[in-house]
Amino acid sequence: MDVLGDILYPVIDDHNEVHDDARLAKDPACVLFGEDAVLQSMELVGFVIRVQQHLEERFDRGIELAHEKALSRRNSPFRTIGTLADYIAELLAEDSAAA
């Protein structure tokens, strides 16, 4: 599965339809969190929630992105579109291995 194309880019398209002032690029280097971030704090929370909803619709089960494991990492998985894609791929692989 292509996490960028199948999961994140459709959510980015939905986000960009509503947020003209905080448009996200469909680019792995697009900064979501931290210095040079496109999104404000609450916009990031909303974006992550929409990604989780898209994952739940796609896989018919919940996958929590913002939990202690993610927040305790030295490098945030929410820094860029690319790091978020890598993190989602990692969680999906763990979920498949546990099943």
Image (tube, rainbow, N blue to C red):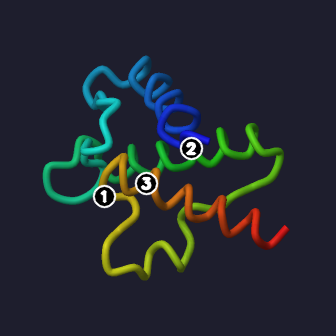
Q: Nearer the viewer, residue 11 or 42?
A: 11
Q: Is residue 17 above or below residue 92?
A: above
Q: Secondary structure at mark 3?
A: helix
Horizontal arrangement in the rendering, residue 6 relative to residue 39 (left or right): right
Disc number for residue 79: 1
Q: Is residue 51 above or below residue 66?
A: above
What residue sits 73% from the left and 65% below the top? 95
Q: Do the numbered discs 2 and 3 sit on residues whose CB atoms are within 8 Å? A: yes
Q: Secondary structure at mark 2?
A: helix
Q: Do the numbered discs 1 and 3 sit on residues whose CB atoms are within 8 Å? A: yes
Placement of the C terminus among the 4 image quadrants: bottom right
Assess disc 3: are there few (<14), some (14-19) or many (≥20) residues with their C-alpha within 10 Å of its C-alpha.
many
Q: Nearer the viewer, residue 35 or 84?
A: 84
Residue at the spot of label 2: 51
The amino acid type, in three-letter code, at marker 1 is Arg
Placement of the N terminus among the 4 image quadrants: top right
Q: CA distance from mark 2 to mark 3?
A: 10 Å
Q: Nearer the viewer, mark 2 or mark 3?
A: 3
Assess disc 1: are there few (<14), some (14-19) or many (≥20) residues with their C-alpha within 10 Å of its C-alpha.
some
Q: Secondary structure at mark 1?
A: loop
What residue sits 54% from the left and 43% below the top? 3
* Disc on the earlier residue, 1 or 3: 1
